Structures are given as C-alpha cells and as structure tokens.
Amino acid sequence: MPDATVYGVLLSVGSVGVVYGLVQLRKARGSRRWPVCEAVVVKSTLKGSKGGRGGPKFEPDVRYRYSYGGATYEGGRIMFSGIPFRSTREDVEQFLEYLPEGERIPVRVCPRDPRVSVILPGIDRNLLLLLFCASYIAFTGSGGLLGWWDGPTSAESIHQCGEKCPEIERPRPPAQ
C-alpha cells in the first residue's frame, strides 16, 4: 500500500484542481451575463506540439483587443475550459477561419475585472471533466490518509459478526 506521502500529494493536487475548477466554473457561469463588447482580432495563428499519442496536436493562439470603461485591454481566452483546446491541424485551421486578424468579434467582458474576457461564454464540458477528475484524485488522497484503502493494519482482523479472529497462518514450506 502507498504511504501517507503519496496520499497527501494526491489530496493536495486534487484539492488545487478542485479550487481552480470551481473558480473557472464561477467565471464561466457568470460570463453569460457579462456585457458584450466589440473586439478586434490582432493575432490568429496555429500553435503546434510535437505530439505523442495520436500524433501532433495543434491549438489556436488568438489575441484580441477591446475597450471597456474608457480603457483598452487585450485578451486571449476563447472559452473557460479546464483543458486547452487541442485538435488536429485541420480542425484548428477550420476554427481559425472565423477569427482572421482584423476581424471584429463580440466578446464578453467581466464588469468587476475588465482584464478578464471570453469569446465563447458559458461552461465547457472539459471544465466539468477537470472538476470530476480533480475531485476523484482529492477523494482518493483523503481516503488513503483516513485509512479507507489500507484494509486491516494489525495481526488480527475483525470477523463479519464483530468477533476478533486470529489471522489464518499460512503453511510454511518444510525445512531442508
């Protein structure tokens, strides 16, 4: 069985993921009601990775400029997602066709912090996936620290009826 350090790391990593996911979820839900501003796409390129399983993956690299409350800001968030949008070269190129440089697009701007903006408001399913996985990791870590996954820890085990029963000894090989 893993020791307490492993379970502690799982609990820590899972908890950080849950907190991050909940913050993003709150912003994603609220973004539907944020005011809409006009933005101009200033960068729209394809960013690639060397790949791994399934070959190389690509993601859009989009920057846009908008004005809110008399100040000018630059944003790059396409959607609130726990996982970056990565796909095949063709899918990302098709997505970027709608966001060419110089294009005027609507963006939602957070009224409390105008530096936060998004092109596609609302909750992305990948954010929900992140929250589920992070919760599972945190639950596994806390269960391990509480001893839920370790089983009996002494030489005696407790019988289903509640009586203590000595652990069954395994036969030993004959001495040579």
Image (spheres, helix red, strand yellow):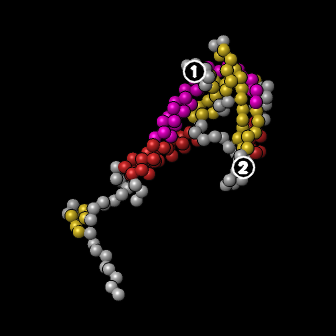
- Up/down of 90 relative to 43, above or below: below
**Comparing labels 2 and 1, the label whose residue is closer to the camera:** 2
Q: Residue 44 appears at what percent x and percent y?
A: 76, 33
Q: Which residue is mark 1?
A: 113
Seen in the picture, residue 13 relative to 23 is either above or below; the reply is below
Q: Is residue 34 left or right of residue 2?
A: right
> Which quarter of the figure has residue 93?
top right
Does residue 166 appear in this view?
Answer: yes
Quadrant holding the C terminus: bottom left
Report the number of numbered marks. Answer: 2
Mark identifier at residue 28: none
Residue farthest left in this picture: 163
Q: Which residues are magenta?
A: 15-43
Membership of 16 in magenta stretch: yes
Amino acid found under the numbered disc labelled 2: Lys
Residue at the (58%, 26%) spot, across then down: 31
Q: Amino acid at mark 1?
A: Asp
* Residue sitting farthest toward the front: 176
Left or right side of 162 for 2 = right
User: Residue 52: x, y in percent?
Assistant: 68, 53
State left or right for residue 37 relative to residue 128: right
Where does the image place residue 125, in percent across and percent down from the top left?
58, 40
- Residue 34 visible? The answer is no
Quick one: SS at disc 1? loop
The residue located at (63%, 25%) in the rendering is 117
The crowd level at tag 1 (other Cα within 10 Å; few <14, some 14-19, many 20+) is few
Within the image, what quadrant is residue 61 found in?
top right
Whether the residues at callouts 2 and 1 have beta carbons within 8 Å, the answer is no
Q: Position of residue 72 (x, y in %)?
A: 68, 17
Residue to which mark 2 is pinned: 50
Of label 2 and label 1, which has the lower sequence position? 2
- Image quarter where the N terminus lies is bottom left
